[in-house]
Amino acid sequence: MNFFEIIIEFLLNPWFILSSLFWIFVAISVYLLRNKKGAYSLYFPLLALFKTKRLNNFINKIARKNPKFWRIFWNIGIFVSFGFTIYGFYFFFTNILNLIFAPSIEQAIIPLIPGVTIDLPIFFYMLLPLLFILTTHEFAHGISASIDGVEIKSTGVLGAGLFYLVGFGAFVEVDEWELNSPKFHRNTRFRIAAAGTYVNAITAGIAFLLLIGFPLMVSPFFKQVTQIYNVLQPQNGGFNYGNLESGDAIDAIKKEGETDDQYVYLDELQGITLSTILNNKTRIKCSVGENLTFKVYNSFSNLNSEKNVFLGPRYNIGIDYEYVSNNELQITYNHTSEENVNIIITQINGTSINRTNGDTLEKILINLNLKNINLTSNLGANYILDVELIGVYIGVQSVLFWMHKNDFAKFLTANVPDFLIKEIAWLFIISFSITLFNMMPIPGFDGDRISKEIIKWIFGEKYGKTERKKKNRFYYKGDDTDCHLPEYHVINVESIKIYLKEKENSKKFSEIVLSKDNYELIDKVGDGYFDTVSIVLPEDTTIEDDTAFEITYEYLLDENIRKKKLILNLIRLISLSLIIGNFALSFIKFGFNFFWI
């Protein structure tokens, strides 16, 4: 396939066409909303965000239905979420010890970065669960804020449309300045901070139950059976090459010559599999040299057929080995002496190993009455292996396959349950991971908010006569001239400066100092201290959006603030060290698979 054909195939892919239609829809929406300030934000080609008041009303309506229930529900969430903070420290600490002293691949923690540590086909399966988790997380914050009267500044819809990836979600923006003010009790902040993670934990629990019960849920339509993906040739230990083929899903098995009503139907949920039948755990008793009749469905050709399958011997030869070249195999472990070995074998029963010509150990093992094998090393030493017959073998490699039970399921194809179980698996993995990571005390995470509030609760606030000076910048938006200061105990404004561009596209600014007649200090919170500067501008002002206001002011200092910051930063440092340490050790010990877009 040449480069031009690859481009054509890429452009004609249905998912790429869907993604293109998504961005065409976004472009039309942007055009229609062109006169509405702040109605949308674009991050092409990744995300598009659209703000709407309708979602605000929807969230408020849900919260108003039964506020008492929601308050109890979110109170439980505080303890559940904080429990994940404790568990997070335990998990990352014990995992880092295991990575140091007893590393195994199961303990590796890998950041999921699309196009870097995971490839795009996998990210496709992650996208819908991720958008669902983010949406429910944000709605949880919004509902918990609404029941306590915290303003929801904006809500909106977000859409992702990158090449073959298309999905939708939602976001909620709570008024953080109001929430962190003395206007609200700490319990409100606890509830809101814990709500998102609490819902993620519930999602993880539901997804886990769905994973366990998935075969039972789809059992009216599908069952899991064995599907062959590779039939071994004789030189690789196969007995049925040219008979069975890739894609054959085994529906049922009977002894050769039996009637159709004697078929034993495979069903993983019932514990009836190819392995249980070959290991004589059903009514069918298998012996070397016999034939079984397989009823198979090939998903590639969409054909049903019956095939007679030969049962070859399965031997235990007492060693582990691997090929190190076309003419040599290496014995790595001797099960008789239970020791690791390093012996290079060049001949089997006097014949030189040649994998190209089919002269292999596996070909020797297809003999029906094999008693022993003579192996000759590269040093001329001979090793006689006693061979033990332990069962039957048909010489295939297989996977599980969703076999349809009726015409409706056949119409859906096996791709539907396969897609659903992958989506549920990623829903569990992502929701549990977000729950664990998000409750760690790291800046920007909900766990940090809860930790900060706990420390504030323990040490309290102490406002004496100590004053400090601070300078903050705000940006004019044209519809709101109230500047909410990050300090809530302001006693005086020293100056307010406006920085105006001297010319269009110029980097030089002229400075204007506002007089006291042009601003007012306000107590928005209602606790007896100033916290907001309201700037008074003429109605015909020519000040443009995003013009900078610089406010210098004096405020009362919380005398416990240094102590609280020190403890919080120490907890943050420990959290970051544990997480980064886990990532670093995982990479050092096992490495990451990198997939570049």
Image: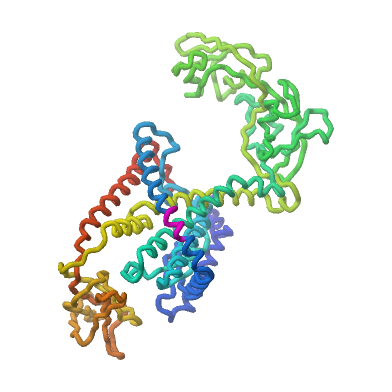
211 vs 27, left or right, is right
Give percent across and percent down for residue 172. Answer: 44, 67
For residue 392, what is the image quadrant?
top right
User: What residue do we see at 48% from left, 65% from top?
Assistant: 170
Give percent across and percent down for residue 325. Answer: 48, 24
Give above or below for 506 relative to 517. above
User: What residue do we see at 48% from left, 16% from top?
Assistant: 338
Number of on-image labels: 0
Magenta range is 74-80
Quick check: is 77 in the magenta stretch?
A: yes
Residues 595 and 537: in front is 537
Taking the image as drawn, is residue 7 in sight?
A: no
User: What residue do we see at 18% from left, 77% from top?
Assistant: 492
Residues 273 and 160: in front is 273
Give above or below for 229 relative to 38. above
Identify the coloring. Answer: rainbow
Quick check: is 149 in the magenta stretch?
A: no
125 vs 586, left or right, is right
424 vs 541, left or right, is right
Give above or below for 263 relative to 421. above
User: What residue do we see at 73% from left, 21% from top?
Assistant: 289
Give percent across and percent down for residue 420. Answer: 60, 51
Residues 72 and 19: in front is 72
The dominant secondary structure in magenta is: helix
